[in-house]
Image: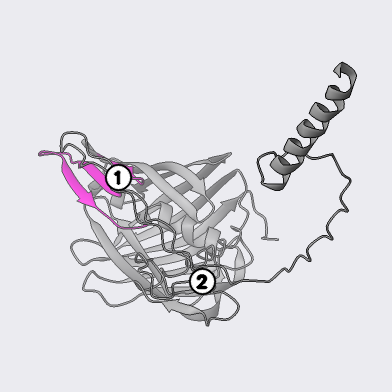
Amino acid sequence: MGRSARPWWLALAGSLLLHGALLGGLTWSLPQWQAQPESLPIEARLMPAPPVAAPRPSVKPPVPPSRPKPAPLPEPVENVAEAAMPEVAADVAMAAPPDEPAVEIHGLEPEPASPPAAEAEPAAPPLNPLPPRLDLRFQVRYGLARGEQTLVWVNEGDRYTITSVAGATGLAGVFYRGRFVQTSRGRIAPGGLVPEEFWDQRGDKRSSARFDAAKGTLTLDPAKGAPRHFAYPGAVQDALSLFFQLALTAPPDGQLAYTVFNGKRLRDYTYEVRGETRLETALGPLRTLHLARMADGDGRFEIWLAIDRHYLPVRVLHSDDQGSEVELVLLSISPLGSAD
């Protein structure tokens, strides 16, 4: 009995287990190998990118008025042709994207181009050479009176001194005593003589003048009275320097204009060339260039310059303050030489 009962229980237990599995009560199953599913195909499509919205400009807190700051630069705007542009100082064509035409921005008128550099003024022609020292002696005719005048030219480097000494001779010396002395000093510039000082002595009367070429002013200290001041534009000559200014710059081209100090005042004079003439002198016949001052109500002035003697004056005719005519005729030149 005992041995036959165990198989029956075992059969009963197996039957219960089988019914439980069929009824879904148990989920356990033996492990099994399953085939791998096939990979799903991958499909790629090009989709248009969504439009990019323009970034909103950042809002900055207001700046206190006590500490002003420059306005912020505008945010960049892409692909917008109507974007506001600041004014510019010239008309500019802006480069647009390839598919869009260029946008022309109009602003203020363009700045004018820089003017070309002014052409340099032509250099003054070279001065005629003069010896370091010249002594010219003239005979002076003043009405019935006769006299002599010496004119001495000395130059050292770029400095010059001209001295004139005149006195009566013969019977006229009885009535006209004393000497008339004038001196001019200054410098030699590329354009000629630049007077700086002038002295005039007639007997016991003395006067002097100082030239300031930089300021264009002249100060006269007369023999009597307070100093007098004159203004002059450009170059100026005095009664002595004019002779050698003409010699240094001859022959003139057309008319000549000079502001001249005659020892008392400044006057503007214009001289014209009357042409070449042959003149008999104590040195023999000389080719001369005849110049005359144009009518100006200040009397007569004519001068003859020796072409072959450094264009030095060999004859002078002029009227004095009283209207009396004075003539200077050359007697000698030392050293005696011809111009190159």
Question: Is 141 situated left or right of 254 in this image?
Answer: left
Front residue of 42/202: it is: 42
Q: Is residue 229 above or below residue 14?
A: below
Front residue of 38/248: it is: 38
In the rendered image, the quadrant that contains the N terminus is: top right
Q: Pointer 2: residues within 10 angstroms few (<14), some, or many (20+)? A: some
Which of marks 1 and 2 precedes in the sequence?
1
Q: Is residue 252 above or below residue 73?
A: below
* Residue 300 horizontal/vertical position (percent): 30, 72
Q: Is residue 94 above or below residue 117?
A: below
User: Does any portion of residue 312 appear in the rendered image?
Assistant: no
* Type of the residue with mark 1: Pro
In the rendered image, the quadrant that contains the C terminus is: bottom right
Q: Residue furthest front?
A: 1
Q: Report the span colored magenta.
A: 208-234
Question: Is 252 situated left or right of 128 in this image?
Answer: left
Front residue of 71/145: it is: 71
Number of marks drawn = 2
Indicate whether residue 214 is drawn in magenta. Answer: yes
The residue pinned by badge 2 equals 252
Secondary-structure class at tag 2: loop
Indicate whether residue 148 is drawn in magenta. Answer: no
Question: Is 56 situated left or right of 76 in this image?
Answer: left
The residue pinned by badge 1 equals 70
